[in-house]
Amino acid sequence: MRAVVSLLLLILGLPAPAQVHTTDDYLSRIDADADGRVSLAEYQDWMSYAFDGMDRNADGVLSALEQPGGRGEPVTRTQHRERLAARFRKQDANADGYLSAKELAAPPR
């Protein structure tokens, strides 16, 4: 559990791969297919930049040494994406399977 918290804090504390200034700008950067909404896959892909940066040996697993503080249970890319999916579902207020600009701008639920 400590590894999960550390990973989330790191993800939330790192700058995004590209600078954004407005919710619409943020939406347009995440929205890979430019349909005006963010799918789960687009969200997971965008939010995985921190995992990718920490996975120094690119094996798809964050070992204890690759995590903040150098300790914690290993976290696989699959586990990471599952956690992102849970966060996505919480943000998807209207449960349509996509995040709108308004849902992206809303505080975490």
Image (tube, rainbow, N blue to C red):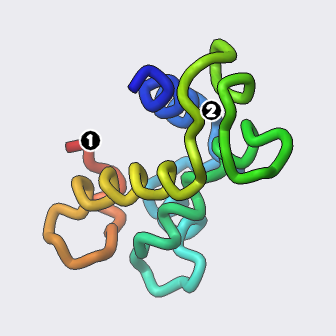
Name the outermost residue toward the front: 73
Residue at point 22%, 54% (across, down): 90
Q: Nearer the viewer, residue 102 or 42?
A: 42
Residue at point 53%, 31% (across, down): 7
- Residue 1 is situated, as x and y percent measured from the top left of the image, at 39, 26
Q: Is residue 38 above or below residue 75?
A: below
Q: Is residue 5 above or below residue 75?
A: above
Q: Nearer the viewer, residue 74 or 95?
A: 74
Mark earlier in primary sequence (1, 2): 2
Looking at numbered disc 1 in the image, what kind of residue is underneath it?
Pro
- Residue 72 is situated, as x and y percent measured from the top left of the image, at 56, 22
Instruction: Examine the rendering and report whether any part of residue 18 can be seen.
Output: no
Label 1: which residue?
107
Residue at point 17%, 71% (across, down): 95
Residue at point 59%, 77% (across, down): 32
**Disc on res. 26:** none
Label 2: which residue?
14
**Element class at badge 2:** loop
Q: Is residue 90 above or below residue 66?
A: below
Q: Residue 92: which quarter of the image? A: bottom left
